Amino acid sequence: MKKCIYDYIKYYFMILSIENKMRKLFLLFTAISLSLTANAQATKKKNVCRVTTKTVVAQKLGYVVSGTVEGVPDGTKVYIAEMQGFFSFVPFDSTLVKNGRYEMKGQQKQPAMRFVMAVVDKGDPLMAQFILENTHITINLTKDPKKAAVIGGKDNELWAEFNRKEEVYNSKVEPIWKIANDSTKTQIERDEAQKKMEGLNKVQNAEHTQFLIDHIPSGVSSILLSYCYAQLDEPTLVKILALMKEKCPDDEVYRKIVREREVGKKTGIGTQYTDIALNTPEGKLIKISDFVGKNKVTMIDFWASWCGPCRQEMPNVIKAYNEYKDKGFAVVGVSLDNNKEAWKDAIQKLGIPWPQMSDLKGWQSAGAALYNVRSIPATVLIDQSGKIVAKNLRGEELEAKLKEIFK
């Protein structure tokens, strides 16, 4: 069963902790649980956020994020940052520590998962994860992440409640996970442990979904939906979207999913392709339509120089291209890079022979948006008439499809 992104993070750090690697990052995410639990204990439980007069007032007033920073000199910079991908932080607000304290003010359209961090000259940054919403939030950063505290905000309270449920699940699954991955155990023991984990995972996914549904509308529900909606079955997703349409039609996540589903219908298998026009590394404007019609099959290859799986897959694509290019197979790369030089360097080092295009906007790529690309590598195969005949084929699947087409 596919997992939500927070499942991947959980298992990723479980592996790291057991193998005694990247212990500092593990402590950071452990601190998330403890700080949010402290938040729940420090504040009185209330109902989840709804659009009320108080909410409108809060939106006008904006957010205030303040607190103390342990053991750093005045002038130390403190950021509010968003995590994009795994462990890539993009700051969007900052201030300086003065008399051991910091404060940042601003406007947040709707609650979102963020990090506050103080970058020090030596050692790890002091960090805490929280949900940024238009209210006063106190976050005291400490050298010991277990002592960090996040106080304030209804969605932070709700996230702490969700996190406590996760801890109950983690306590059940971790010993089973260890058995399933213990080479000293027999294959039968490992298989039995794996089955138990799968059963627990089904229960957990069902609880995640129910928690999300029960707390619509709230920032937490929107955040959870943004993590997991691609893995939800169609009836459940339709139910959730119907509830959000009724209770929070202006929710950004809801509107984004609706838009993506509309795009998905327009770019599904059997539909006519949507053209993309972007610049090559040399600055020349090219279009997908420059190639479709001239070739029996044209493949759009969405990738990026910073994407490990993309680089691993590239030799397979190059092999397929070399095998079928003389029979009418064309490839056009659409890069989700931000850095032009890194993009050009990767093209050269990987030996990519086909044309490339990009607007250098990363995940905000206009080309990727046209095809609802939310993970890479991603591919779209288009026949000579302009019909999409396959999507997201890699390795042996791509080879088999091309063999079928060019038989």
Image: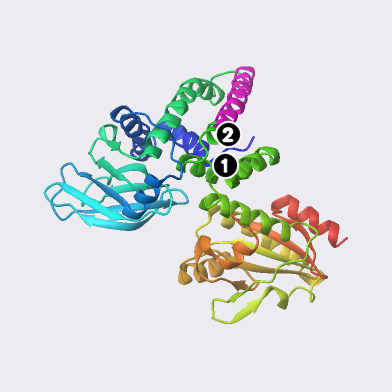
Residue 325 spot, x, y in % from top left? 76, 69
Q: Residue at x 58, y 31 (%)?
A: 205
Residue lying farthest left?
99
Q: Number of marks in the image?
A: 2
Is residue 173 or residue 345 the one in the foreground? Answer: 173
Give me the residue at 27% from left, 36% from top. Answer: 148
* Sequence-first disc among 1 and 2: 2
Is 225 located above or below residue 147 in the figure?
below
Relative image position of residue 144 (x, y in whole percent): 24, 35
Residue position for label 2: 209
Question: Which residue shows up at 56% across the image and 24% down it?
Answer: 180
Give, as a single range, the part of the protein colored magenta. 187-210
Say if the magenta span includes residue 202.
Answer: yes
Image position, residue 282 (x, y; %): 54, 80
Q: Which numbered circle lies on residue 228?
A: 1
Q: In this view, does 68 lie to the left or right of 339?
A: left
